[in-house]
Image (tube, rainbow, N blue to C red):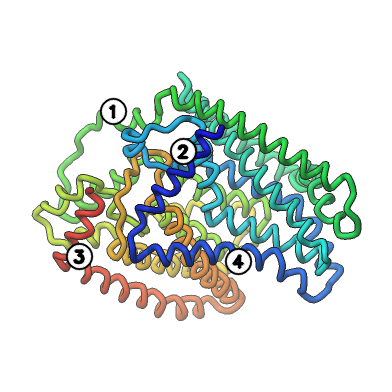
Amino acid sequence: MWRPVADTGALLRFRAGMVRDGSRALALAGSAGLVLITVLAGWLPAYLPDGESRRTDVLSLLPSAMVGVFVVAAISAAASGGGRELLPREEAVAFPLSAVTDHLGALVMAPLNIAWLLQSWTLLGATAYVAGPTPRLLLSQVVVVTWLVTATALAQVVGWAFELLRRSRHGVWGSRIVLVAVGAAAVQLVATDRLVPLLQRSPTLHVTIASLRVRTEVTAGFFATVASLLAVTALAVAVGVALADVVSRRPARDELRLETAAQEPRRDPGSDLVAVMRTDRVGIWRSLPLRRGLLVLTVMPGGVAIAGDLPWQLLTILPGLVASGGALLFGVNSWCLDGRGALWRDSLPVGPELAFVARALVLVEVLLVATAGTVAMAAMRAGVPTAAELAAVSCGALVVVGQVVSASLRWSVRRPFAVDLRSARATPAPPLVMVAYSARLAVSTTLVGLGFSVLALVPWEWSVVVALPMLLLSAWRLSRTAAAWGDPVTRGRVVATVAS
């Protein structure tokens, strides 16, 4: 294992060396900020005002929250074809990686995910709130951090196992059958009200007890729990190495099927705008990570809303989650969809404004389709909405989509990256940049969702009145970005970057 560990360290230094000079200080500040937030999340909540009923409620949710960390990490690893890659596929041709190095790199990259970070901070904060300001709070958090490591390693095993299923002879249909079976089981658990009792009996209950019992005394159970989690982690890493080795020896059937499929020519478009938009749509729906990501973004929040029986007043949060997640799939670096074809696209006899409008419209329609699917799923259990609730959800969805599109295209023009989105494990930007983008989108869209949840309690006209100036602000920001894209120097820099 020492050689792969050394190779992983070398690759991390290699990735750090690729950071531009002006961005290194920002990257260091961002890394320090993540560490600081983690420390504060695991310490400050212990000093919140006492409230036995609230502490009891939080305590009852801790085992389920630990399961949630594993579920989110497993879905992320499975959807991304085994986890994020430390070295892009094309660069790995010149620097071949062993399966062990690839697996370790995926483990290192797993925490650089805003969903993983938010859940981890929530779990640390909830533990600190329940434990209180005791001198042994650090020991309680040691158990929680150990569980986070164990859950990430186990989730990586699930990701490699699912990718191995995909790459088997009939893996495409096999993976679909597994997904349908898991979804049907989840629906049955929710419909029969057995989901919560099942979560309360999960093994994480023992982890929760061990992390909180250490407040009063340090017993052998504390050391046994930590040792057991570390043993499970070591076993999961070993199993993940074996699965990654098998996966690396099999062809990626999904990717090859998309790249080698014969596409029937369609009728000529009626206008230049339709032609450019058709090309943009093809770049999205024929990209494997985008198709998987949009499916997960549509189904997961809707499934959570169904399981949690969310009312219409709280459904205003969902459009922001879906829109920000969809933008993180490609929107924050939207011109990378063209890849090397960006040189050809820029040479077409159409104005740059038309290409920008087409990209913006396609991004809007993709986000709206995913948002509509999520809200439709959630509405199956939320019941019939009032006019105010329907207006709040609809206006909130339009506002967050406008915010996300304007921010994404602004970042795409200001800071492009060269990314090959044909790989199922690719991301549109480097890990730390993705964390920063996701944090900014999550904060803004969540605040908007909370605001419209309040507007759901007042007449529907208020939602329209509040949404109109926010939509105009997003349109003004888009116009400024369009003007920047029209500058030949700026456009040449973006095209040269994404095509390199």
Point out the image quarter for the N terminus: top right
Residue 376 disc label: none
Neighbourhood count class around disc 1 (C-alpha, 10 Å): few under 14, some 14–19, many 20 upward: few
Give the spatial CA distance, label 4 vs label 2. 29 Å
Residues 293 and 82: in front is 82
Nearer the observer, disc 3 or disc 2? 2
Give the spatial CA distance, label 2 vs label 1. 34 Å
**Which residue does the numbered mark 4 point to in the structure image?**
37
Q: Extreme top residue here? A: 169
Residues 6 and 352: in front is 6
Give the spatial CA distance, label 3 vs label 1. 34 Å
**Which residue does the numbered mark 3 point to in the structure image?**
490
Residues 126 and 318: in front is 126
Quarter of the view holding residue 490: bottom left
Q: Secondary structure at mark 2?
A: helix
> How far from the left and from the top, in percent, is residue 104?
53, 39
| Residue type at numbered disc 4 | Ile
Up the image or down, 267 lies above or below 400; here it is above
Neighbourhood count class around disc 2 (C-alpha, 10 Å): few under 14, some 14–19, many 20 upward: some
In the displayed structure image, the side of residue 423 where residue 353 appears, left or right: left
Residue 7 disc label: 2
Lower sequence index among marks 4 and 1 = 4
**Which residue does the numbered mark 1 point to in the structure image?**
260
Lower sequence index among marks 2 and 1 = 2
> How far from the left and from the top, in percent, is residue 45?
73, 69
Neighbourhood count class around disc 3 (C-alpha, 10 Å): few under 14, some 14–19, many 20 upward: some
Give the spatial CA distance, label 3 vs label 4. 36 Å
Residue beneath the point at 65% across and 64% down: 39
In the displayed structure image, the side of residue 247 where residue 120 appears, left or right: right
Q: Secondary structure at mark 4?
A: helix
Up the image or down, 471 lies above or below 23; here it is below
Up the image or down, 471 lies above or below 87; here it is below
